[in-house]
Amino acid sequence: MGKADKERLIRTLNSHLNTIHETFQMLDQNPSSSLEIVKWEDVVKMGDQVYKQASVAGMVWTGERLEVKAIEENMAAYFNTLQGFLLVSFGSKVGAGPTLSSVIHAAVKQVIDSSFRLWKESVSFYGSQNNKDQTQVVPQLVGAVWDACSALKKTPSTNITAIGRAITQVAVSVKDVLREMKDLKQGSSDLDEAPEESSSKVEGDTQDDGNTSDDADIGNDLSADEMRVAQSAMSVVSSTLLVIKELIRSITSLLKLENANIQSNIASLENLLKLCQGIGVQVDELGACLYPPQEIPAIKAASEKISSFLDNMQAELGSLNGNSEGFLQACNDLQNSCKQLETELSGSTATDIESRMENVTLSN
């Protein structure tokens, strides 16, 4: 196990890595629609072959004797399999829209990255006197390849499935924002209680058994006006969540009817996803602006953008004849919630100006 043998393995590995890297770059391109599409099941099968080769590599590297020739043969077999995996993955992108292409790219990249780590780490162990690290680390690296290959089985295989999952992820994000909003509380200084009661309450809190008061939590110091704005914003986010749920239900209904239009018009579904994601971004913005001091202009802008995205979403789904009664009602409720929020913001702005005027000291 001389230095020359290790350098030889490193050169051989780098040659394989460069070849795979060049092939992987093909996945950044869209294959010609004239090519025959490769079924995702074939990609999964090739992924299984990659894992089998990884298992063999693991046995080679954890064996009692490490022979350069055996390692090179295993290395060649592994990267030939990986090359085949990349080629069928590229073929599976025929007819794929932006969302599915992105999903495929990410799934394939996990397999490539875990394979690169397996071989780079393994070769680095060659000639090392510490076999204990080698026998512990290599099986973990093989396990990472197995995880990446197994994930292929859960990867969406059609445009509609990929888009549907992406829309569902927006719903999950909106739900998280709503949950955080519900933790907002009005500050104790704005609650309707007598000064004496407030004083004794504070005094009592200081004599507590070392427990931290909830008033120290972030978001607990909203004024009464800010709390009303927050409640209106919560109504907007809650209504947004219902719109997204109804959107998913509408698309699902069209699929059950085997609507040929929705199967072929992937562009409309991609547009619906972009609009949905745009609303999700504004919901995040809305939630971030509610903490004191509230950013009224930003809250108003987010509400207006949500309303605009919603109009476009109705038009896009309408082009697919998918505007169900439930979806339209949810849209109407969201529009009303946005109007209510803007009304609340107008009142909040007027109150803020009035408060500032009261603090102005007039001079002669």
Image (tube, helix red, strand yellow):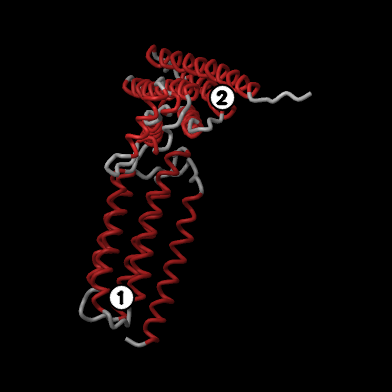
How far apart marks 2 and 1 lie (CA) works out to 64 Å
The amino acid beneath tag 2 is Lys
Tell how many labels. Answer: 2
The quarter of the picture where residue 219 lies is: top left
Q: Position of residue 218 (x, y in %)?
A: 42, 37
Q: Looking at the figure, which quarter contains the C terminus?
A: top right
Residue 71's tag is 1
Q: Is residue 209 above or below residue 329?
A: below
Q: Position of residue 66 (x, y in %)?
A: 26, 80
Tell me the crowding category of disc 2: few under 14, some 14 to 19, or many 20 or more residues within 10 angstroms, Cα based.
Answer: some
Q: Is residue 300 visible?
A: yes
Q: Secondary structure under badge 2?
A: helix
Q: Is residue 364 left or right of residue 88?
A: right
Q: Residue at x 56, y 30 (%)?
A: 295
Q: Position of residue 205 (x, y in %)?
A: 33, 36
The amino acid beneath tag 1 is Ile
Instruction: Give the farthest residue toward the left.
Output: 64
Q: Nearer the viewer, residue 3 or 329?
A: 329
State if disc 1 and disc 2 touch (CB < 8 Å). no
The residue singled out by tag 2 in the image is 300
Q: Residue at x 41, y 28 (%)?
A: 188
Q: Is residue 160 visible?
A: no
Q: Nearer the viewer, residue 60 or 230?
A: 230
